[in-house]
Image (tube, rainbow, N blue to C red):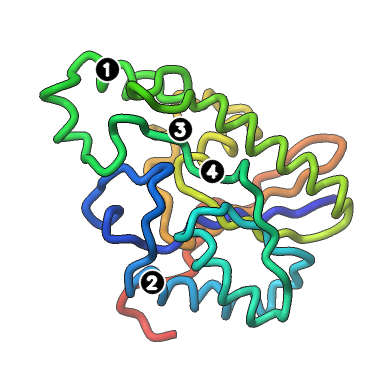
Amino acid sequence: MTTFILARHGETIWHTGHRYAGMSDIPLDAEGQRAADALAEWAVGAQLDAIVVSPLIRAVNTARPSAIALGAPLHIEPDLVEVDFGIGEGKTISELRPEYPDEVAAFEAAPADTPLPGGEVGRHAIERYLRVLDKLRERYPVGRVLIVGHGTAIRLAVSELIGIDPNRYRDLMPEMLNCGRTTLEITDRGVALQGFNVPTYVPGASA
């Protein structure tokens, strides 16, 4: 059995303003760095065998304190990047809707199948994530792997893995906390969801 702990990156200034940051390489803000430090505190006792991360800087800087705490390398996986939101990059849905009302409506109705113009089809992101999980299962057939990635891509992949229509990910998984942890156990028999969006860091709380 391979256990995967999928954690969303820490906060960035775009995310506080609810701006789409798919392939845009936006760094963590101060709050995001505090969340990354909290993830490292958790990682010390998590008995991890590997830390795997998206190459985008907000994910790398979230995972780096955990790697330092464990004295472990960071394994970069290009397929763990966020969904590309095309014309949505750097914008809010409210800013997009007046200019692209039909496109936004289609994206909101079926986000796994209908991307924003110039963006990535959500199901392609699912395929990327599943390729990574398959590869890591071969590498760590009995192990615990922390994956630091991105909120939309994680929710799409988790939906697929547990048998939920990925087009409903926003309805059933409306929020992904910064450094929230989702735990999946995968065996030859299938997938068990052992935890979803478990808080690692609570803003304003003491460590």
Residue designated by label 2 = 202
Q: Which amino acid type is marked by label 1?
A: Glu
Q: Residues within 10 Å of mark 4 (few under 14, many from 20)?
A: many
Which one is nearer the viewer's eye here, 69 or 90? 90
The answer to which of marks 4 and 1 sits earlier in the sequence is 1
Mark closest to the chain's N terminus, 1 or 2? 1
Q: CA distance from mark 1 to mark 2?
A: 35 Å
Judged by depth in the image, the label closer to the viewer, 4 or 3, is 4
Q: Rounded to the nearest whole Å, what is the CA distance between mark 4 and mark 1?
A: 23 Å
Please, what secondary structure does the residue beneath circle 4 have?
A: helix
Which is more foreground, mark 4 or mark 2?
Answer: 4
**Residue depicted at x 74% and y 68%:** 48
Q: Sequence-wise, which precedes: disc 2 or disc 3?
A: 3
Q: Which residue is mark 1?
A: 103
Instruction: Tell me which label, 4 or 2, sits earlier in the chain.
Output: 4
Q: Position of residue 59 (x, y in %)?
A: 51, 59
Q: Is residue 34 left or right of residue 64?
A: left
At horizontal 34% and vertical 24% (from top left) the residue drawn is 116
Which quadrant holds residue 107?
Answer: top left
User: Residue at the location (73% across, 43% down)?
Assistant: 133
Q: Specify the quadrant of the image occupied by residue 114.
A: top left
Question: Disc 3 marks which residue?
Answer: 169
- Going by the numbered disc 2, the residue's amino acid type is Val
Give left or right: position of 191 versus 5. right
Tell me the mark number nearer the camera, choosing from 4 and 1.
1
Instruction: Read off the residue under disc 4.
Output: 154
Q: Nearer the viewer, residue 191 or 26?
A: 26
Q: Are marks 1 and 2 in contact (CB under 8 Å)?
A: no
Mark 4 to mark 2: distance in Å?
20 Å
C-alpha distance separating marks 1 and 3: 18 Å
Q: Amino acid at mark 3?
A: Tyr
